[in-house]
Image (cartoon, helix red, strand yellow):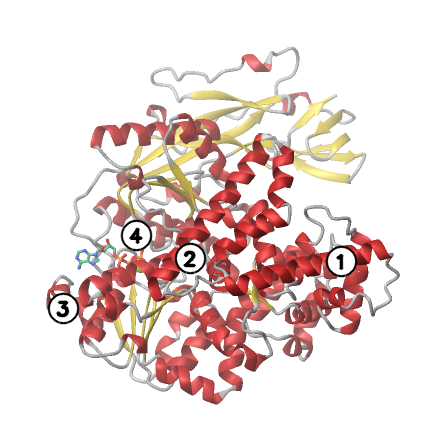
Amino acid sequence: MQQYIDQLNEAQRAPVIQKDGAMIVIAGAGSGKTRVLTVRIANLMYQGVDAFNILALTFTNKAAREMKKRIADIVGNNEAKNLWMGTFHSVFAKILRIESEKLGYPSNFTIYDSQDSARLIGQIIKEMQLDKDVYKPKQILGRISQYKNSLITVRAYFNNPELQEADAMSKKPRLGDIYNNYVERCFKAGAMDFDDLLLKTNELLNRFPDVLAKYQDRFRYILVDEYQDTNHSQYLIVKALSDRFQNICVVGDDAQSIYAFRGANINNILNFQKDYEGVKMYRLEQNYRSSKNIVEAANNVIDKNKTKLDKIVWTSNDDGPKIKVHRSITDGEEGRFVASTIFETKMQHQLMNSHFAILYRTNAQSRAMEDALRKRDIPYRIYGGLSFYQRKEIKDVLAYLRLVINPKDEEALVRVINYPARGIGDTTVEKLTVAANHYKRSIFEVMEHIDKIDLKLNSGTKTKLQDFVTMIKSFQVINENQDAFVLTDHVTKKTGLVQELKKDGTPEGIARIENIEELLNGIKDFTEGQKEVDGARGSLAEFLEDVALATDLDKDTGDDDRVALMTIHLAKGLEFPHVFIVGMEEDLFPSAMSMNTRSELEEERRLFYVALTRAEHQAYLTYAQSRYRWGKLVDSEPSRFIEEINAEYLEYMNPMDTGYRYKPTMDLDIFGDVDKSKLRLAKPTAGTPPEYITKNEPISSVNIRRLKPVNSTASSPKVNLIDNNLTVGNIVMHERFGKGEIVGLEGVGADKKAEIRFDVGGLKKLLLRFAKLNVI
Ligand code: ATP
Ligand code: MG
């Protein structure tokens, strides 16, 4: 053990050696916080603490597995096996399974994913005859999620006039009723959504002092990684469980708090010292992960934030190469640049694919990257986005399996009751739903008693419903005697799912069958693994729980050597030698939706800090001058975050940009018979500022942009043909507002404005510098 402690620096050693009490480690990226947790756990065990008494909460289950592996290397596998480790959701789902009946839930409760939840809310909105354009299911779900994570139950909501007023103000006076219906329907279906896993744990610990005492006594040592991103609900769970022994160690970095939009509360880290007695605060300052250039650049970035704890981060690592900045014309070209750079770097330095990561702000950006990587035959793996278990055919099979375990599961039932088609139409399902609501029973129960309830169904329909019930019950019998693989194999055949896809015959249909086969492989793997562990059967219930809580990061790819593609949010805590941060453009990163307030912008900046600090050796910042967004080609400017890094840490890869910062000037609309498809990038001539033209589709205009020397105060030349041509009375077309007539002009030069009466939309004043107008 001592050898592992010796490998730590002095600052890291202190929180490892302090055995008891409350402690917080606040430190910048790459300073060894996660490593401190790992060694601390091993050391606790070395000092005689039973693994059974230690609870460690991590950001992903994969992180927990890796930590466990490292601990096993130190203290031995048998010891490490009993540690309670995982995400909040997975650990407390396990506890809820044990205790659920106290809360009125079956122990086989289903876990609804966000798609299930959104569909159910959509259904409720429809039943309540509300306007789904006002009550958007996903938005409502987000709001309900916020309430749950702040522990605002339905009752608390209705006791709080301010919340109700706020929802009424945002034109959603019925939100409380939707919330109420949603909670009732989930309960009736024996289902919990993700937020319930935390909310119900809180309820359990609050309402049942004996249960609280039991788990307080069990978890004598509690450790939390990434504490800056815990929400209120998680905070309360940790607080309650650690209250008796107060042996709690949390680590985090306020500069990496990036989940405020989901209710993470940075005050949890700031107030920690008030929550426990005699809190020891430790700070780590040495970064072991990244080169000096990257560490310094990251410091530059985070310095721009006003709300932060002052921290020092330094490294004794080499300077390393400068951060490379690359501009391309389109996102397609950006993808090609990334792919070819990976290809060449790999060849030159004998690297693996897994040494590279491509990080982006939004999932949609992965497509251009994927296309380019595929063309180069570079294997990659996408984390997030549509994961395997979210694919339709997989969700269909899983829905049948969920029904076997919990026939009350309404989302699963609605999904497959008529898929493959068996003549049970929407009207029938609606009648069943109404009856189920009326009798306060599940739809399945109504179906079981369909003979005794008068729903005005014809006898053919009744028989079909009964056949469905019988089929599910026959699966249940198999489930009692066979393992999950045998059952699933039977289900895919007996339900007609596979035949349905075979009928399809298209390449997509075949790919779907392959996916189902892949699912069966996965289940086989799981059941065999289970049998090895304890000679158990490899139960379906356990498999489903694994699936429900699996995030993409959790999937072990074995020895797969692939380039990693993911959003920055998912990259938290990870590290890679070479990191590409792509789409470094205004409105994309920082996101257009997060620039309304200083605090939103600061969260975007923290996100950039997280992205940059993932890189060990080389970071690339790439941007495109135009990209397709929402089906339209839009022009973009480089992200302000690039400029926030001191130029000495940057290397501009496009020769034109050396010494120049890209500065867009203004739009220049071209009239007359110009063949726009012939317009090409204008090559810079020596000594003059480079100038280039980009195509701008589908608007019939082109943009001329000029680069301005970095330190020059001279403004770029201003040209605007429209400006010269416009007079009052002109009829113009505007890209968004359509046709209109100029009724007034005012101002001069860059400030010149036109007052235009649009056919639709009325009078508007537009700054000509920005307005994309064509005279017609
Ligand atoms: P993040 O904030 O990104 O989660 P972190 O503070 O958790 O970072 P770690 O992931 O624990 O940092 O450590 C970063 C890297 O530095 C890891 O590769 C780790 O093994 C290494 N490291 C940490 N401490 C030391 C040390 N004392 N000596 C050598 N390497 C170290
Ligand atoms: Mg970490």
- Label 4 Cα neighbours within 10 Å, binned few <14 / some 14-19 / many ≥20: many
Gap between marks 4 and 2 measured at Cα: 48 Å
Q: Which numbered dot is residue 465? A: 1
- Label 3: state its secondary structure: loop
Q: Secondary structure at mark 4?
A: helix
Whether residues under marks 1 and 2 lie with C-beta atoms below 8 angstroms apart, the answer is no
Disc 1 from disc 3: Cα separation:
63 Å
Amino acid at the residue labelled 2:
Thr
Residue picked out by circle 4: 299
Indicate which disc residue 119 carries. Answer: none
Q: Which mark is residue 1?
A: 3
Tell me how far mark 3 sits from mark 2, CA to CA: 35 Å
Residue 262, position as x, y percentages in the image: 52, 61
Residue drawn at (16%, 63%), measured in percent from left and top?
8
Q: Tell me the residue at 72%/65% (across/down).
A: 443
Mark 3: C-beta under 8 Å from nearest atom of ligand 1: no
The tag on residue 527 is 2
Residue 317 place in picture, x, y as percent: 17, 48
Mark 4 or mark 3, which has the lower sequence index? 3
- Disc 3 marks a residue whose amino acid type is Met
**First along the sequence among labels 4 and 2:** 4
